[in-house]
Image: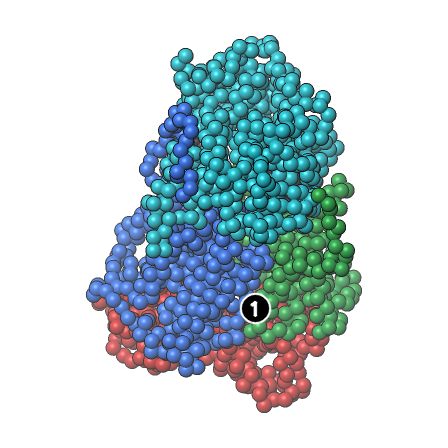
């Protein structure tokens, strides 16, 4: 770099050691606090669940939390990219349904897995691209662009598969059946592995590539990012493409999970994904958060479901109230932890 | 209907069934989207009580298949004796049912069927035949109203859901031969009163000469009645309303003549379920498909049963 | 620098015009930049300097005119393309991402990569090197938002150095820097110039302009006044060209507003801070401010002046000590409490803490007044007209349109709007943090005069400025801060010089 | 004042141009399908007809969107409105159903009173979570969105509570001075809010908080109180909307009352030109947005769009309106219009 070779002509008056450095009593970086809060409350939840219910902490139950939510993990990862730029993606639930329906339709029309699987994921990519263009080129607010995409994808679902279609393709069946792991139920499925791989890729992308850092920069201030000469346009379109692709992949995982395609799957799934991301400590205003936090967020939601099932005595309405209450306790605790540490 | 009295008998006999402790049953309900569903839940919770020798784990899936699969997996992990559930969707249950089968837990389906080719995955299905329900409405309309040219509007259930699809199909099958009947419009009312009313208001605007409203459930029918009355017409006279379900509000309207005909879809599956589980527990076998006997009511019939209608 | 044979300009802008809804911001302006020169862009607030810069780097699309870079006609679609063409820019307001670390802000888009992935260790050490050139010894890993505006500005400058630029544009880089930082920056600028980089420099400090620039282009009201060699244009002429008014104004300027002799009428201070402090921000300090008195805060960048003012205003919570207002102990819970007691604070970061961008000038000016009255009692149109027009005129806010969107105003004019907001509330104690940042020469004198007058009329003022002369000129007393601690307090008199204060700061009050 | 009004008016007209065109096109399509659609007839002294239906039907969404506009202006969002509607209906109707005399006005009023109280409490709760605890609005209101329906079902025992009560029925289906009461109620609150936000300083303070919360706080604005207030207002309006919805069918449907209405409300707000990033809001814009969405829903039935294609139809209309409204397209269209005008004269340097 050019300026390195510059020799100062004037010796600085006094090096200011303390300049700008903050006195820190805690060594935890502030940015990690929300995630840390999530971890602590999650552990507390596990402990309470374990003490209340038999079998709760068994390997099988814990493995199930991941297996049952692998599609949500993938979707939440995609959502994290979007939210980090300060956007939001409401279309993911409908895209999951659409790619599931397309998968079911293709399999029932004799396409093989090698053709169907990439195409199914591509469905999500294309919708993501459409959204990205709407958001970036036409400057439509993400909420609205993705809401329109949600209607669109849902509408296409009814056209592709008006009724639920079972999937009998051997590859999918095999993927659904395969379990790796120990006898006592601590197992992992191919879907789980895919989800974890997606998380790993996302992590590296966000933290170790220029694209990833641009995502954060846009969330910190789009105008600034633009003035800093960062490729804002490309990045913004790309995050929606990523989210769409993740939703497409999520749809595939859901199709494997349920071995069917159905137009009404994933109603409200976008909210689950958003909730997971936010619970994981990501700010909806963008610029701050971690993909691993989102995974924790999914686990929290999964655990809440598990607790409900283990409780077993809740009526339908108490179930709703209970979920709401757990969510409340969770976010308030997490928030208090964060404030405390600050 | 079918299960009522036999269920009672079972309850009485359960006192001595307690040798191995209570029978643990995991039940995953679709949700609580309607009065019908609430009655269904209550019936099951009332039948599988501790006194009757059951240990019921109930969970509500909030209309999400993923929650239901998750709940069933959880029941398997908990090691319950029986699993019962009302599937949200027909397809997509093979994997989790296979897991249940591996764990040697018998599965009973209630209310809605699954389209699994491998019928060994579940022991039996109890519930209604939605196509048949639509067909019975269609037959009645065809016989009683279709004697002269009539215009029918249809209020569909939630787009894509099995009851909506089946009830539509059944109705269409039944009226196929009757040229007098023309379905001039068919729109979804999402099984709710409010949307039933909204859609009916639109129909009334768009089509001046509607003779019959076919609603896929009572709630939409009741909503339609509100719309008809608001438009200054008399339901039951100017426009006839036929529905499926037979919940209390619907039966009341039927008794008052606002609704003309209702095909019942019996939500009280609890006693049947209890009986089946007891039979299986005692080593017996059950039919793979038990269709509940659904009645149909006209105004007279409604008046007769209304007094002791509980849901 | 002497111009012998006219070399070819690296940037030549001709006939640039830009119109915003209702404003013709630029009208046929020319600008030439030659390699190896420092070129000053001069003009009053709102003259169009920043707009011209943004036109060059593609932030704004030009209505007409041509831009030739390196002999080739170019229109950049955005700063990214301009950067690729070797034009590196530090825009007027600090435009960094305060959610990221210092290192990232410097290196964003230029991270050191190995096999496609960012090598953070080397990226950080590169960032540290760049910070060092600016004599900035801060942790590259620390979050940008934890640093004061001045530090952020230095970081922004460091960032501009990362690219191996042929043109470096600095839009008011020195507005919140103190003398040392400025000297340091100029060293770097000179070194770059000597290596043939063309530098475009904007500042309202004439001293600085005369110290560093070779040539200058003067704008007035969006039009070009002319291009001059710095050596051939003296200050009086320059100012005349900038403001287009007669010399009389200038003489008035030279005759700096003098602090009046403090004659304390009150026996008790209007506001008294006793052992007020906040852990990690500022050590407990005592400070008295009497009505009719200007208390200046002197200190280097990061010395805690801003923090002191924020505590007095209740913008941050003190965790020790107390504040007495007219002798009554008062808990400053929120700015509202302070406001209700006639204490107001004009923040140094006008972009993030001052101006409400999408509101109009009028709404921004009456905001403080309105907040004080509560939402129910809306300020009548008549009252607001009166207030707004008064301050638009008094401070020379341009465009003089109360319905202009405040965020679209030029930086200096935004600062004036912010000042107007606080003056409009007729406060008892005015906490001014860098109130003249980015304000042009004429307006600066006006504002200084205003402050002196207000004090004379009995207002208490706490005055913070990076410009020590200004502090000395206005203050009756000066509190000296260092390392987030108040180290000395002196009574100002004509004998006190800037050197005395600098010495006090350097010695930490041990003189 | 007049200069603000005209300049703001000009901008508003511009921004709302395409939504209004969309409205007109939808209405036109309906007329083409059903010729009598726009006819307004007088029956028993009441007005009937398509436009009246749309206006009456808009009342629920208008109320919800009204509150939502204010919340969105502060950079927030309220997902709980649907649940609040359900609770309002559940509380009011179960109280009426439990009383001896459902037809009595006093009973109805007290039922409404207690429902309003409950809903205000929910608003206070939401506002507390957002403004005081500092939880992100979307999650804070998600709590009630989830639990609220549970509470409503708890009140109704999971059943759809049906009542017969003439005074209550008036809310949605009654007429006053020939106009639907529901529309009058919504209109009243709309006008009241428009006056309150623009005749007092509330509007500008809300915008200020939405645009730059930090600067607003430093300017002495009670940001916390204002944010709290808008959530309470939002819950209140949702509550009134809940009364209209439950009165419409004379039943409290805890599960379905106001289901997904938050999305429609947000859509209406945004079509009306208020940005989800907070700041400047336009209640008139919201009104137009509401009319567009209600007409869109209504036209689905009138035009006989097949049930399977309803979603697709909605998506296309929304996308079209948004695209036409987008700055880029607007700019392009304007440029084309201008192209016929003489080119700007080059000013010599
Ligand atoms: N985005 C915009 N929209 C409308 N008007 C604008 C916009 N940007 C700048 N202006 C107007 O253009 C004129 C020139 O502004 P500019 O920022 O270039 O001034 P400047 O010379 O940099 O002033 P300062 O010294 O205060 O920074 C001003 O009148 C300003 O109000
Ligand atoms: N939000 C914050 N939280 C904690 N410490 C901060 C914060 N903002 C700034 N600081 C630190 O407090 C110290 C003093 O702040 P600041 O630099 O604003 O003081 P100042 O004397 O006003 O300097 P300047 O001339 O830069 O305005 C600095 O070391 C800075 O890093
Ligand atoms: Mg400028
Ligand atoms: Mg400072």
- The answer to whether the beta carbon of the residue marked 1 is less than 8 Å from any atom of ligand 1 is no
Q: Colour of chain A?
A: blue
Q: Which residue is mark 1?
A: D311
Q: Nearer the viewer, residue B89 or D210?
A: D210
Residue D132 in the image, given as x and y percentages of width and height: 48, 39
Q: Nearer the viewer, residue C357 or A308?
A: C357
Q: Nearer the viewer, residue A324 or A341?
A: A341
Residue at 38% in and 73% down? A259
Q: Colour of chain B?
A: red
Chain depicted in green: D
**Chain under disc 1:** D
Residue C510 in the image, given as x and y percentages of width and height: 39, 14
Which color scheme is applied?
by chain
Give the class, few, some or many, for how many residues have Cα within 10 Å of label 1's Cα (few <14, many ≥20).
Answer: many
- Which quadrant would the C terminus of chain D be assigned to in this image? top right
Q: Residue furthest front?
A: C5
């Amino acid at each position: 770099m050019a300026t390195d070779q510059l020799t100062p002509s004037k010796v600085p008056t006094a090096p200011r050691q303390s300049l700008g450095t903050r006195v820190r009593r805690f060594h935890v970086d502030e940015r990690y606090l929300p995630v840390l809060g999530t971890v602590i409350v999650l552990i507390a939840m596990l402990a309470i669940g374990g003490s209340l219910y038999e079998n709760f902490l068994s390997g099988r139950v814990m493995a199930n939390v991941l297996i049952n939510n692998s599609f949500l993990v993938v979707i939440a990862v995609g959502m994290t990219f979007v939210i980090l730029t300060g956007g939001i993606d409401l279309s993911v639930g409908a895209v999951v349904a659409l790619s599931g329906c397309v998968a079911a339709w293709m399999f029932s029309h004799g396409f093989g897995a090698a053709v169907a699987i990439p195409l199914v994921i591509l469905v999500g990519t294309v919708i993501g691209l459409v959204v990205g263009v709407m958001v970036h080129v036409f400057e439509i607010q993400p909420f609205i662009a993705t809401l329109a995409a949600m209607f669109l994808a849902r509408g296409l679902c009814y056209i592709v598969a008006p009724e639920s279609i079972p999937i009998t393709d051997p590859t999918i069946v095999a993927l659904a059946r395969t379990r790796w792991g120990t006898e006592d139920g601590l197992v992992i499925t191919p879907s789980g592995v895919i989800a974890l791989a997606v998380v790993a890729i996302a992590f590296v992308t966000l933290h170790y590539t220029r694209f990833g850092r641009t995502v954060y920069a846009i969330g910190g201030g789009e105008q600034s990012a633009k003035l800093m000469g960062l490729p804002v346009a490309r990045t913004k379109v790309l995050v929606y493409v990523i989210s769409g692709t993740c939703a497409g992949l999520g749809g595939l995982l859901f199709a494997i999970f349920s071995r069917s395609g159905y137009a009404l799957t994933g109603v409200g799934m976008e909210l689950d994904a958003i909730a997971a991301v936010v619970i994981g400590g990501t700010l909806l205003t963008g610029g701050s958060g971690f993909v691993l936090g989102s995974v924790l967020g999914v686990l929290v939601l999964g655990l809440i479901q598990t607790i409900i099932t283990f409780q077993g005595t809740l009526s339908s309405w108490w179930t709703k109230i209970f979920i709401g209450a757990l969510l409340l306790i969770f976010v308030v605790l997490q928030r208090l932890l964060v404030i405390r540490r600050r | 209907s079918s299960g009522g009295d036999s269920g009672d008998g079972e309850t009485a006999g359960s006192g001595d069934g307690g040798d191995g402790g209570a029978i643990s049953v995991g039940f995953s309900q679709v949700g609580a989207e309607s009065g019908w569903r609430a009655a269904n839940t209550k019936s099951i919770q009332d039948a599988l009580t501790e006194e009757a020798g059951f240990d019921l784990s109930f969970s509500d899936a909030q209309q999400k298949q993923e929650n239901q699969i998750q709940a069933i997996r959880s029941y398997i992990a908990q090691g319950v004796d029986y699993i019962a559930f009302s599937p949200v969707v027909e397809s997509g249950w093979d994997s989790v049912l296979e897991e249940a089968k591996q764990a040697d837990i018998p599965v009973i389906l209630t209310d809605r069927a699954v389209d699994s080719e491998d019928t060994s995955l579940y022991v039996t299905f109890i519930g209604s035949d939605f196509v048949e329900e639509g067909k019975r409405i269609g037959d009645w309309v065809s016989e009683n109203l279709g004697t002269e040219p009539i215009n029918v509007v249809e209020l569909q259930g939630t787009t894509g859901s099995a009851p909506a699809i089946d009830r539509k199909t059944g109705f269409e099958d039944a009226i196929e031969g009757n040229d007098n009947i023309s379905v001039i419009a068919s729109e979804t009312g999402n099984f709710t009163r409010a949307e039933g009313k909204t859609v009916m208001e639109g129909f009334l605007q768009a089509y001046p000469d509607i003779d019959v409203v076919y609603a896929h459930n009572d709630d939409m029918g009741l909503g339609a009645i509100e719309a008809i009355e608001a438009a200054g017409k008399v339901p039951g006279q100017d426009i006839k309303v036929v529905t499926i379900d037979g919940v209390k509000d619907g039966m009341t309207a039927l008794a008052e003549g606002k609704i003309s005909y209702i095909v019942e879809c019996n939500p009280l599956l609890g006693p049947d379920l209890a009986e089946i589980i007891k039979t299986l527990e005692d080593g017996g076998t059950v039919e793979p498909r038990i269709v509940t006997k659904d009645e149909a009511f006209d105004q007279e019939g409604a008046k007769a049963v209304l007094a002791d209608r509980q849901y | 620098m002497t111009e012998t044979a006219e070399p070819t300009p690296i940037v030549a802008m001709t006939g640039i015009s830009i119109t915003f809804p209702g404003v013709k911001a630029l009208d046929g302006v020319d600008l030439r930049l030659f390699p190896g020169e420092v070129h000053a862009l001069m003009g009053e607030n709102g003259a169009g300097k920043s707009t011209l810069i943004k036109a060059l780097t593609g932030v704004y699309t030009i209505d007409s005119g041509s831009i030739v870079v390196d002999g080739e006609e170019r229109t950049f679609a955005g700063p990214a393309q301009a950067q690729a063409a070797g034009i590196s820019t530090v825009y007027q307001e600090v435009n960094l991402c305060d959610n990221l670390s210092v290192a990232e802000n410097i290196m964003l888009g230029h991270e050191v990569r190995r096999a496609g992935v960012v090598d953070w260790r080397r990226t950080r050490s590169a960032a540290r090197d760049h910070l060092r050139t600016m004599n900035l010894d801060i942790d590259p890993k620390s979050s940008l938002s934890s640093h004061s505006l001045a530090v952020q500005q230095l970081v922004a400058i460091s960032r501009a150095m990362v690219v191996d630029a042929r043109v470096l544009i600095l839009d008011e880089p020195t507005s919140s820097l103190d003398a040392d930082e400025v000297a340091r920056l100029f060293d770097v600028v000179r070194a770059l110039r000597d290596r043939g980089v063309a530098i475009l420099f904007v500042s309202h400090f004439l001293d600085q302009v005369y110290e560093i620039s070779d040539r200058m282009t003067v704008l007035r009201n969006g039009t070009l006044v002319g291009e001059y060699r710095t050596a051939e244009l003296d200050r009086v002429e320059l100012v005349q060209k900038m403001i287009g008014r007669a010399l009389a104004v200038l003489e008035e300027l030279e005759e700096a507003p003098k602090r009046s002799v403090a004659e304390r009428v009150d026996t008790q201070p209007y506001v008294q801070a006793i052992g007020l402090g906040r852990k990690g921000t500022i050590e407990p300090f005592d400070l008295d401010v009497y009505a009719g008195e200007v208390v200046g805060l002197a200190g280097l960048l990061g010395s805690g002046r801003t923090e002191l003012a924020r505590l007095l205003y209740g913008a941050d919570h003190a965790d020790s000590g107390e504040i007495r207002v007219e002798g009554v102990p008062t808990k400053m819970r929120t700015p509202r409490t302070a406001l209700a007691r006639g204490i107001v604070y004009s923040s140094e970061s006008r972009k993030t803490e001052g101006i409400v961008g999408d509101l109009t000038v009028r709404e921004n000016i009456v905001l403080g007044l309105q907040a004080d009255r509560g939402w129910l009692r809306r300020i009548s149109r008549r009252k607001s007209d009166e207030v707004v027009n008064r301050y638009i005129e008094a401070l020379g806010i341009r465009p003089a349109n109360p319905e202009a969107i405040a965020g679209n105003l030029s930086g200096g004019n935004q600062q004036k709007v912010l000042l107007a907001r606080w003056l409009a509330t007729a406060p008892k104690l005015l906490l001014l943090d860098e109130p003249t940042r980015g304000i042009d020469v004429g307006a600066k004198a006006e504002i200084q005069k205003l402050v002196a007058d207000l004090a004379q009329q009995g207002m208490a003022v706490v005055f913070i400025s990076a410009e020590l002369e200004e502090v000395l000129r206005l203050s009756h007393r000066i509190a000296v801060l260092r390392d987030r601690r108040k180290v000395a307090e002196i009574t100002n008199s004509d004998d006190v010089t800037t050197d005395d204060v600098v010495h006090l700061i350097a010695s930490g009050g041990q003189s | 004042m007049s200069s603000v009004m005209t300049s703001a008016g000009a901008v508003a007209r511009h921004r709302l141009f395409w939504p209004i065109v969309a409205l007109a096109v939808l209405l036109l399509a309906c007329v083409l399908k059903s010729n009598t659609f726009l006819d307004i007839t007088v029956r028993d002294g009441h007005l009937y007809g398509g436009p009246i239906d749309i206006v009456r039907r808009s009342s629920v969404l208008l109320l919800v969107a009204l509150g939502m506009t204010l919340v969105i202006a502060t950079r927030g969002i309220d997902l709980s409105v649907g649940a609040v509607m359900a609770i309002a209906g559940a509380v009011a109707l179960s109280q009426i159903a439990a009383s001896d005399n459902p037809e009595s006005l006093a009973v109805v009023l007290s039922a409404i009173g207690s429902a309003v109280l409950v809903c205000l409490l929910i608003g206070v709760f939401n506002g507390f979570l957002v403004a005081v605890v500092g939880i992100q609005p979307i999650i804070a209101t998600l709590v009630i969105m989830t639990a609220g329906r549970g509470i409503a079902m708890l009140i109704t025992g999971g059943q759809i509570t049906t009542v017969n009560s003439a005074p209550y029925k008036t809310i949605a289906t009654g007429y006053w001075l020939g106009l639907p009461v529901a529309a009058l109620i919504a209109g009243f609150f709309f006008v009241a809010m428009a006056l309150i936000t623009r005749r007092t300083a509330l509007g500008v303070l809300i915008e200020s908080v939405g645009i730059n919360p930090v600067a607003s706080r430093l300017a002495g604005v009670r940001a916390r109180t204002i944010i709290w207030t808008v959530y309470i207002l939002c819950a209140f309006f949702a509550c009134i909307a809940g009364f209209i919805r439950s009165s419409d069918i004379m039943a409290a449907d805890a599960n379905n009352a106001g289901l997904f209405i938050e999305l429609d409300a947000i859509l209406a707000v945004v079509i009306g030109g208020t940005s989800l990033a907070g700041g400047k809001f336009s209640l008139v814009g919201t009104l137009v947005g509401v009319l567009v969405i209600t007409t869109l829903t209504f036209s689905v039935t009138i035009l006989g769009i097949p049930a399977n294609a309803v979603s697709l139809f909605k998506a296309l209309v929304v996308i079209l309106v948004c695209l036409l409204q987008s700055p880029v397209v607007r700019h392009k269209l304007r440029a084309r219009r201008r192209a016929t005008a003489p080119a700007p004269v080059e000013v010599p340097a």
